[in-house]
Image (tube, grey):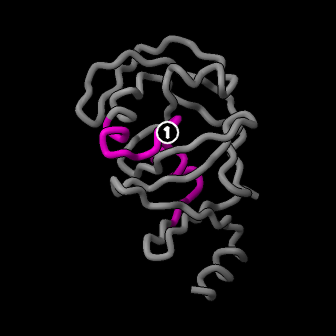
Amino acid sequence: MHQIDEILDKDHYRKIRFKISKTQHLLLSASINGVKGDFILDTGASNSCVGFEETELFKLITENSKTKAAGAGAIDMFTQAAHKNLLKIGRWTYDDFNLVVFDLSHVNTALEQHKAKRVQGIIGADVLIHGKAIIDYASQTLYLKKHV
């Protein structure tokens, strides 16, 4: 495993640890606009998102969106968009980060029913693609490539 770290470090990847929850979700800490939060790392989510109740916390400037959100048993959910934010995961940053804002209460209700910790949002495929992500499930490590 040490060789993988060295190779990816030379290729400008940042190493980020994640945890696996009781519900088998991948969990990591990240900050948006300098404010830390807890997030689910979700390879099946097309876009990263936060809940409506987190807009003030993360200092988001939102605008209404015509796009409807769907996922995890919920469909046709009203959304907002928040553009040009700063995302930081470990030592990796994304300084023109766009977010979807919508009602995440169904996600947190499901987590709470399993006595798992609430999350402020979801890190989705948009970030994983932008960061040319490599996920090592065995070592619970996410690698994201720094843009040089």
Is 124 in the magenta? yes
Query: Is residue 136 found left or right of 36 in the rendered image?
Result: left
Residue 53 in percent (x, y) is at 53, 20
Farthest top residue in view: 64
Given residues 102 and 119, the one toward you in this image is: 119
Residue type pointed to by label 1: Val
Asked if residue 86 is positioned above or below residue 105 in the image, the reply reads below
Q: Secondary structure at mark 1?
A: loop
Asked if residue 94 is positioned above or below residue 6 in the image, the reply reads above
Asked if residue 59 is positioned above or below residue 36 in the image, the reply reads above
Magenta stretch bounds: 110-134
- The residue singled out by tag 1 in the image is 119
- Residue sitting at x 71%, y 49%: 93
Residue 1 in percent (x, y) is at 56, 86
Query: Is residue 70 found left or right of 43 in the rendered image?
Result: left
Tell me the quarter of the image containing the C terminus.
bottom right
Residue 118 in percent (x, y) is at 46, 39
Residue 111 in percent (x, y) is at 36, 41
| Residue 20, quarter of the rendered image | bottom left
Query: Is residue 45 found left or right of 15 in the rendered image?
Result: left
